[in-house]
Image (spheres, grey):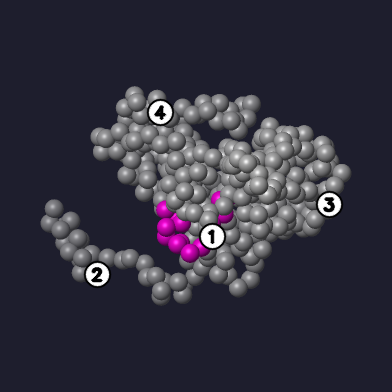
Amino acid sequence: MITKVGKKIFGCEAIFDHAAKSNQSKYPWAQNIVSVGLLKQVKGRWACLFLDFRFYLPLKTIQGKKETATIRGEVVPFQTKMAQAAQMLIEIAEHFSTVPILAVTDSWFGNNGLWKPAYKAIGNRFNILSRLRCNNVLYDLPEKRKPKQRGRNKKYGQRLGSATDMAKTVQQEARFYNVNLYGKQREVSAYSRVVMLKTLKRPVQVVWVFRRTQWIALFTTDLNLSITQIIEYYGARWKIESGFKELKQDIGSQKSQCRNAQAVTNHLNFCMMATTLTWIYADRLKTNPERRHKVKGRTSFAFSDIRRIIAEAALDPDFERVCPKYSSSPVNSVVTVLLRMVA
């Protein structure tokens, strides 16, 4: 969500912000963006490299044919966030036709609304990893068919209860695992089990992660992932939030006040490309960048540290040999002076 000021900026609407603080508006005038990024480890830390995005506009805005929902005079068609996310994943899967795709999402996208269209188009190469809602009901795997048994095979086994009910029973069976989580090696208490999930109509691996007083449940359709991989990948999902912070504050997407759809789309495309190229540059460095502003508990470098290295490289005199600065020719300068004298 990128807040704006102008009332005629494309993609803007008064949108509910569930993460708004007490001193912030719950319905800011902003652009609601659905984005897909590549989670990649850069010099030992996770980073989000943006790949694609869509502007989400509420149905009432499109039906009202508001100026903020038009491109060259035509109103944009309505798409749900699920449909937008599925479309982007399908396009990425078509481009990388042989690579398995694991979509790491929050609990809002971790349901059949995203899974069904994406899996139908991509096939077995597609898997999802998300947070399980605490009220999701879980079922055991169906029993094997007995000889001469009548009727169809059972799709679901015995009802195990909700994720909350199972958390109370499996906590004593949890084991400790060393996981690379949030830039540190941490000891995490977790328990895993393969169950049937009716919302996806298929078997999933559920991992309960227990903390001192709280717990969360994660699930994935990829049954080959280990417990440590599931926890680490979901922890890396938060880097998309860091990516939006870098996009808005470091790159300056939030300060742009472009109005028409083409300018708004181009500006956001360039901002996301700049963010992605910055991380690619950091990955190509021979040594780890040094963190300029020391923060207790954090040893890895920040996005601003890479920007500083790029700025220093661009100011180096040798850089002009590769990328010479534009300068007008002496002949044109003389002509300009003569024309001014004549005028």
Which element is circle 2 on? helix
- Mark 4 highlights which residue? 59
Badges 4 and 1: C-beta atoms under 8 Å apart? no
* Crowd rating for badge 3 (residues with CA inside 10 Å; few <14, some 14–19, many 20+): some
For the residues labelled 1 and 3, the Cα–Cα distance comes to 29 Å
For the residues labelled 4 and 1, the Cα–Cα distance comes to 34 Å
For badge 4, the amino acid type reads Leu
Most extreme residue toward the right is: 172
Instruction: Name the residue rendered at 60%, 73% in the picture.
Output: 286
In the figure, residue 336 lies in which quadrant? bottom left
Which element is circle 4 on? helix
Give whichever of discs 1 and 3 has the lower sequence position: 1
For the residues labelled 2 and 3, the Cα–Cα distance comes to 75 Å
The answer, for residue 252, to whether it is visible in the render is no
For badge 1, the amino acid type reads Pro
What is the number of the mark on residue 100? 1
Q: Which region is colored magenta?
A: 91-104
Instruction: Name the residue rendered at 52%, 28% in the picture.
Output: 16
> In the visual, does 130 lie left or right of 71?
right
Residue 199 picture location, percent across and down: 59, 38
For badge 3, the amino acid type reads Arg
What is the number of the mark on residue 175? 3
Give whichever of discs 2 and 1 has the lower sequence position: 1
Viewer-side label of 2, 1: 1
For the residues labelled 4 and 2, the Cα–Cα distance comes to 58 Å
Most extreme residue toward the left is: 342
Magenta includes 100?
yes
